[in-house]
Amino acid sequence: MSDFLYSVEREYDIPVEILWGAWTDADALQQWYHPADLLNVPGSVVSDPVPGGWWTCGVDVPEHGFASYFYGRYTAVVENARLEHSMHYTQSAEEFAARDETSPAHRVVVEFETRGFRSWVKFSQFGVLPEGQAARAQAGMESYFDSLGSFLSVN
């Protein structure tokens, strides 16, 4: 689970405390943690940002007739600075509901920093993916960051 796959980073014109809240508050995540052209499965987002706490999210992909479900546990939480969590993936609502932690998992590290009057965030994913999938995952996360920017501009 230590192989670096990709990272995405951006700066936003907001205080780091607001950016942190967007990444840790379940209601905020429900509104933005999805690609810009998709939406989350209603009620699928959970965020308990303490070591051992759950985070979960389901993204509806109606064009392809399925939902992508992600879940894991926070492993490190340093307020306004760093989040780390495991990330399991399934397209099965039943597996998502069961939160099977024996399935293969990736490690996610989200770093935050104040940069003058702006805030910076970097999402890094570690693990193993089939050939070519890391680039697709990175492009997907770029779209999540677009969604975050839209969310932050109206909240």
Image (cartoon, rainbow, N blue to C red):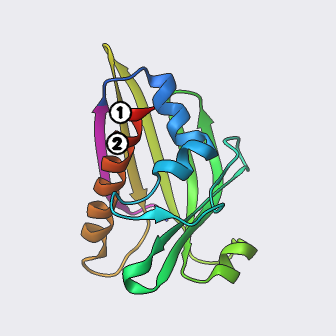
Indicate whether 73 appears above or below 118: below
Numbered tag placed on residue 19 in the rendering: none
Instruction: Find disc 1 in the rendering and name its residue.
Output: 153
Q: Is-magenta flag for residue 124?
A: no
Indicate whether 89 appears above or below 73: below
Residue at image position (44%, 67%) is 127
Indicate whether 125 appears above or below 93: above
Q: What stretch is highlighted in magenta?
A: 2-11
Badge 1 vs badge 2, beta-carbon distance below 8 Å: yes
Q: Where is residue 64 in the image (x, y as percent from the top left)?
A: 39, 85
The main secondary structure of the magenta stretch is strand
Q: Categorize mark 2 by other alpha carbons within 10 Å: few (<14), some (14-19), many (20+).
A: few
Residue at image position (49%, 83%) is 66
Using the image as rendered, state which of residue 5 and residue 32 is in the foreground. Answer: 32
Residue at image position (45%, 86%) is 65
Q: Where is residue 116 in the image (x, y as percent from the top left)?
A: 30, 13
Alpha carbon of mark 1 to alpha carbon of mark 2: how far? 5 Å
Tell me which corner region of the image, top left, top right, bottom left or bottom right, holds residue 154: top left
Q: In this view, does 143 lie to the left or right of 90?
A: left
Q: Position of residue 131 (x, y in %)?
A: 27, 81
Tell me which corner region of the image, top left, top right, bottom left or bottom right, holds residue 129: bottom left
Q: In this view, does 5 lie to the left or right of 51?
A: left
Numbered tag placed on residue 150 in the rendering: 2
Which residue reaches farthest front?
A: 154
